[in-house]
Image (cartoon, rainbow, N blue to C red):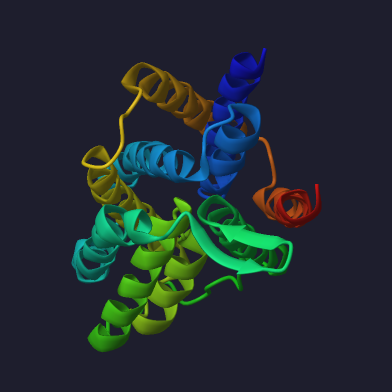
Amino acid sequence: MDLILGYFGALIVGITLGLLGGGGSILTVPILVYLLALNPVTATAYSLFVVGTTSLVGSFRNLSKGMVDVKVAVVFAIPAFIAVYLTRRYLVPAIPEVILTLDNFILTKDLAIMLFFAIIMLLASISMIRGRKSDKQEKKTLTLNIPLIILEGTVVGILTGIVGAGGGFLIIPALVLFANLPMKRAVATSLAIIAAKSLIGFIGDVQNLEIDWTFLLTFTGISIIGIFIGIYLNKFINEKPLKKAFGWFVLLMGLYIIVKEMFL
């Protein structure tokens, strides 16, 4: 029964990505941990593969429409995928199983990852609830602030490596501010960056973990089916109120994870 619910969750992840162009990946880790009982390290690894593969499908669609700024994507993605690979290959395995003991409180590796993931969920939810200001000026002069883009790419890569989520809520504002991209191109370019860094980060896990490829490919395949369903439904649904509602859902999920991990 839990496996069926997990696969249904994979479909919801894909539908959310298809409807909103992002956000669905942040559901992947809770589904894998709480419905399918995977440990957080394995769940974040699998999430990278699911996020990377589903984002890759969306990226091909955006590339065919000329929406991806390849130059900006490369400048951002190189430090991001180096950081995410090193994080998954060396940093995550190096975290001790027991990080801190204080009286009756024990901060384990799994607990730390889930609490950090919950914080990322809260930040992402705030971004979705507040929404993005529409970009009226579609034609902008491309000016790359390369040092800040490299710094942002590195930070996003480390965060992605730890929590296994795409980090679109961090990437898109960076592309608008530091690369002066119009919003639509920033969203499309972000998806390509997420695909590259997530899949390369997953390579670091292949060297450290035993991967259940049958389960992972099935979960990912169902998620990809969900993307196409979401893209179709997007023609009939207003994205803005849906994104705000999803933001509130993610906020509640983040709070639930904190309460569950700390007190239940």
Task: Please state, as top left, top right, bottom left or bottom right, where the N terminus lies in the image.
Answer: top right
Residue 51 visible to an observer of this rendering: yes
Q: Quadrant of residue 144?
A: bottom left
Residue at image point 24% right, 84% down:
146
Image quarter for residue 111?
A: bottom right
Residue 10, x across and y down, in percent: 54, 28
Q: Can residue 67 be seen?
A: no
Closer to us: 82 or 259: 259
In the rendered image of this protein, does residue 14 appear above or below residue 108?
above
Query: Which residue is at 26% across, 59% downward?
Result: 90
Query: Picture quarter containing residue 199?
Result: top left
Q: Is residue 88 left or right of residue 30?
A: left
Give the camera-side residue of 112 and 148: 112
State the image coordinates of residue 260 (x, y, percent, origin top left). Answer: 76, 48
State the image coordinates of residue 188 (x, y, percent, origin top left).
38, 55
Determine whether, in the image, residue 75 is placed left or right of residue 92: left
Residue drawn at point x = 32 percent, y = 45 percent: 59
Q: Which residue shows up at 24% across the image and 48% down it?
A: 204
Looking at the picture, does residue 96 appear above or below residue 45?
below
